[in-house]
Image: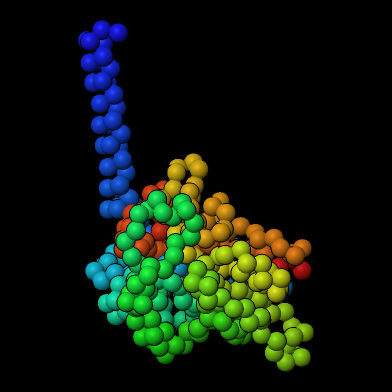
Amino acid sequence: MDAATIRRRLAGAGRLAACAAAAGGAALAYGSLIERNLFGLREETLPILPPGRRPLRLLHLSDIHLVPGQTLKQNWLRSLAGIRPDLVVNTGDNLSHRQAVPPLLEALAPLLQFPGVFVPGSNDYYAPAAKNPLSYFAGPSKLPADHADRELPWRQMHEAFGNSGWINLATRHQSVVVDGLRLDFTGVDDPHLQRDRYSGFPRGSAPSNRAAHPRVAVAPAPYQRVLDYFTEGGAELILAGHTHGGQVCIPGYGALLSNCDLPTWRARGLTYWEHAGRSVPLNVSAGVGTSRMAPVRFACRPEAVLLSLVPRAS
């Protein structure tokens, strides 16, 4: 091969590398400046109510990861009150900054007027730490050694939610009456922090146990052990977040990571979890925000989920 040919091939390889770098830079710019603010509402319908009941509208919020100054996100969250849900379920990771509680409560104020339940996620307890994104391929993320210094004002957030009537389901069960129908909830503290402990579903009185009480299980993160004991315990619907839907996905393929032991194809959307001879609807939200250490989304738009619970066929 003569020198001229070598120079031409090197020049061609250089142009290809430059084009690839430009495409990568454009994708990063799109994901960080545009897609992470393309908030949307995914809608699903589930036949889990007793025959003859009117439908209930359940709004599933997750992974807001609010940072002060995120005006677009705050405005969109406020607009969700226009849906007028019958119940709000918040599956955690609301915070991403020590000063985020006041703007979070301002953004959620219209939704706090509706009945609600919540569970805390790891980024409600601790602020995120900078890390190599490739480290996620080695397994679920872990708390940094200095996590105690990163504690967030989660108690203030919990108190405000509680004062508005939202029920904390971390390691507890609770019945909630919505439009005259009793819904039985169970929830766990964050499995990502190994804090999950299952308390079962409410039992209630003997007469009420003969009625049909839809059972809803709520977790911050959809680890398989949690999904298994919810399913075995009689859940009829499981709600979780944490995965961000993969956050950076490959178009036509989907998520590369779930940041837990959930298969990546389940990292976003409505699927059915099978265990102990039962099959239960599992809704995993892709979430509203991102970690402030990685403020980008690609092929994975932020979302809230509106679940229309309708009667089962009689």
Examine the rendered structure and indicate whether residue 156 appears above or below residue 243.
Answer: below
Q: Position of residue 86 (x, y in %)?
A: 52, 77
Residue 123 sits in quarter: bottom left
Residue 286 or 20: which is nearer the viewer? 20
Q: Residue at x 56, y 82 (%)?
A: 171
Q: Residue at x 31, y 61 (%)?
A: 130
Residue 290 or 44: which is nearer the viewer? 290
Asked whether residue 269 is in view, the answer is: no
Query: Where, quadrant-wise, is the C terminus in this rendering?
Result: bottom right
Examine the rendered structure and indicate whether residue 124 appears above or below residue 210.
Answer: above
Asked whether residue 258 is in view, the answer is: yes
Q: Position of residue 31 (x, y in %)?
A: 33, 50
Residue 54 or 26: which is nearer the viewer? 26
Q: Position of residue 238 (x, y in %)?
A: 60, 68
From the viewer's perspective, is 184 left or right of 12? right
Q: Residue at x 71, y 70 (%)?
A: 232
Q: Position of residue 15 (x, y in %)?
A: 25, 26
- Quick one: which residue is furthest to the front in this view? 145
From the viewer's perspective, is 235 left or right of 191? right
Q: Residue at x 50, y 68 (%)?
A: 192
Query: Where, quadrant-wise, is the N terminus in this rendering?
Result: top left
User: Exactly how many numbered labels are in the figure?
Assistant: 0
